[in-house]
Amino acid sequence: MDLMEHLSQLLEEKYATDEAFADCFTVEIELKPGNRLSVFADSDSGMTFEKCQKLSRYLEGFLDTNKWLGDQYVLEFSSPGVSRPLKFARQYVRNIGRTVTVTLHDKSQQVGVLKAVEDLQIILAQVIVEKEGKKKKEVPVDTPILFENIEKTIVKVAFS
């Protein structure tokens, strides 16, 4: 088992045994040059600074005790943030009602409001423009997109 798998397993055990982290899940673990370990975790109820801090300290204990990265390393533990693609259906659920850009495997893109998340697909609410003679008419449509066709989905940040 490599280090990333081992760390992932430690986090899964924490989520399963500590009620405070029961709705948490690991999104990604990366080891970058210079012994820089980046861990991204999320939560169905929202990832707080306190949850990140406690999980970071939890992992630091194992890293320090077992010297998996030696004496010199940097551990960055955070939520994925808006610039990182959604990876799991449960992340999509938390973003219902927000505008997303979905890039498909054929590199085409769909932009719309995430309306629903189902077992095999998401539903985007979009507006298409149809021509009626010389006039243009905006028509609302629901566009289903299968998860298997999605390369990545990014939540568009709305500034008010």
Image (cartoon, rainbow, N blue to C red):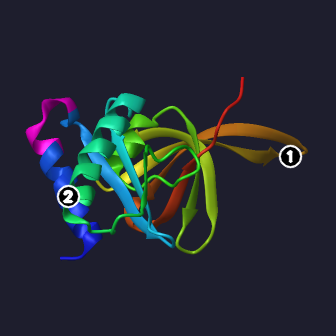
Q: Position of residue 70 (x, y in %)?
A: 33, 69
Q: Residue furthest right?
A: 134
Split into 4 quadrants, where in the image is the C terminus? top right
Could one spot residue 117 in this view of the protein?
Answer: no
The numbered mark at residue 16 is none
Q: Residues within 10 Å of mark 1 (few under 14, many from 20)?
A: few
Kindly give the residue lying farthest to the left in the view shown: 17
Residue indicated by mark 1: 133
On residue 65, the disc is 2
The number of numbered discs placed on residues in the rendered structure image is: 2
Instruction: From the viewer's side, name the closer residue of 38 and 64.
Output: 64
User: Looking at the image, is mark 2 or mark 1 earlier in the sequence?
Assistant: 2
Q: Is residue 19 magenta?
A: yes
**Percent x, y of residue 132:** 80, 44
**Residue at 26% in and 41% down:** 24
Residue 79 falls left or right of residue 14 = right
Classify residue 28 as left or right of residue 143.
Answer: left
Q: Residue at x 47, y 47 (%)?
A: 80
What's the magenta region?
15-20
- Identified by mark 2, the residue type is Thr
Residue 60 horizontal side relative to residue 144, left or right: left
Of badges 2 and 1, nearer the viewer stands: 2
Task: Give the SS element for disc 2.
Answer: helix
> Could you say which is closer to the camera, residue 137 or residue 40?
40
Tell me the quadrant of the picture where the N terminus can be found.
Answer: bottom left
Would residue 143 be visible to someone looking at this image?
A: yes
Residue 89 magenta-highlighted: no
Above or below residue 18? Residue 84 is below
Could you give the CA–CA distance between mark 2 and mark 1, rounded to whole angstroms?
Answer: 73 Å
| Magenta stretch, overall SS | helix
Mark 2 packing: few (<14 Cα in 10 Å), some, or many (20+)?
few
Q: Secondary structure at mark 1?
A: loop
